[in-house]
Image: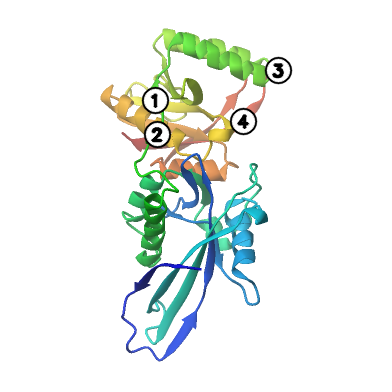
Amino acid sequence: MRTLFEMDKKDYSRCNHTYTRNSARSIIIRDGRVAMVHSLKYDYYKFPGGGIEEGENPIDAMIRETREEAGLRVVPESVKEYGIVHRIQKSDKDETECFVQDNYYYLCEAADEPIDQDLDEYEAKECYKLEFADPAAAIRKNRSVQESPYNRMGFEREARVLELLQAEGYLKTEEGENEKYVCKIASPEEMNQKWDYEIRLHPGTENWIVWKGEAIEGFLSGRSVPYYGILDGTVICEATAVLCPDIPQVDRTTESHVIELCAFRTIKEYRGKGYFSKLMDFMLKDLKQKGYTKAVVGVEPEEKLNREIYRHWGFTERISTGTETYPDGTVINAEFYGRQL
């Protein structure tokens, strides 16, 4: 396998022993985006993969780690060598130890449907999440990590591999290139079409019919604003800002500039690809320009991953707890978190 590049800090002249820990990583590309594991806790990206166990060959390690970290099942027949990154430096934990690592990268394909991740304790604490990331955005993110317990060489290694994939034509070079994706405030006609789609997806329940009427009436009366993400003419994600929310322990007479964000939905095949994040950015900027100063989201207590995603978006202030009753009588618990705009 060819050597892609070397990362040699030359800071190990006083080391008296060596520790070697090689790794294997997958490169899975779909529609110009690359499968990455996103640490929501420290906000960096890494290729799925990890350490090679004793007696394990690099390809088997890559397939195992990709399944565990990302929930992606690599198709063995698709695996092709891409290259090795050689890393050598003084250990972060022992000044007398020289850390040596060969990182094996493989181009491959994976089954369409992901499975559940099987994360180690530290990976679960970091809230590893599979994303098909825009390469340019991932490069910028890794080079701007503000806080983490890890050596920055790891972040830089992944950024440089992404740049090589761009230079060799595997990945696009500009964020959003050739992408006809638009974020906007929905029109009543677009709302009707989207809600009719949801009603067809959920036959036999009155909830969606009632919600459609409430959503359109709320928009027309100025009590809410629907935001849509539209790709090539199709609504693929949405969110709603309720301008006069009924949030427990929020006094509307003194906090009139507070809005609630809700009804987050993304069509399944577009999840984890960054589309909703762009819609969220667009929505928050628009609401700030409208004069609102604080946004609140509600999340069910058992939805820990969603809670961590909201924390990543800045919703860290715990405001209150409450309940919501669906049109069919179902009652759910909710915790409310806020952020300044």
| Quadrant of image for the C terminus | top left
Q: Nearer the viewer, residue 272 or 2?
A: 2
**Disc assigned to residue 183:** 1
Q: Are marks 3 and 2 in contact (CB under 8 Å)?
A: no
Residue, disc 4: 332
Q: Could you tell me residue 130's position as x and y percent?
A: 53, 48
Amino acid type indicated by mark 4: Ile
Amino acid type indicated by mark 1: Cys
Q: Quadrant of residue 49?
A: bottom right
Marks 3 and 2, how far apart in space? 30 Å
Amino acid type indicated by mark 3: Pro
Q: Residue at x 54, y 17 (%)?
A: 194
Marks 2 and 1, how far apart in space? 8 Å
Q: Nearer the viewer, mark 1 or mark 3?
A: 1
Q: Nearer the viewer, mark 3 or mark 2?
A: 2
Q: Residue at x 47, y 43 (%)?
A: 33
Left or right: residue 235 versus residue 258 is: right
**Disc assigned to residue 175:** none
Among the two numbered marks 4 and 3 on one chain, the one whose residue lies closer to the N terminus? 3
Q: Are marks 2 and 1 in contact (CB under 8 Å)?
A: yes
Q: Is residue 319 above or below residue 83?
A: above
Residue, disc 3: 203
Check disc 1: other Cα within 10 Å, few if <14, some if 14-19, many if 20+: many
Among the two numbered marks 2 and 1 on one chain, the one whose residue lies closer to the N terminus? 1
Q: Nearer the viewer, residue 189 or 295?
A: 189
Marks 1 and 3, how far apart in space? 28 Å
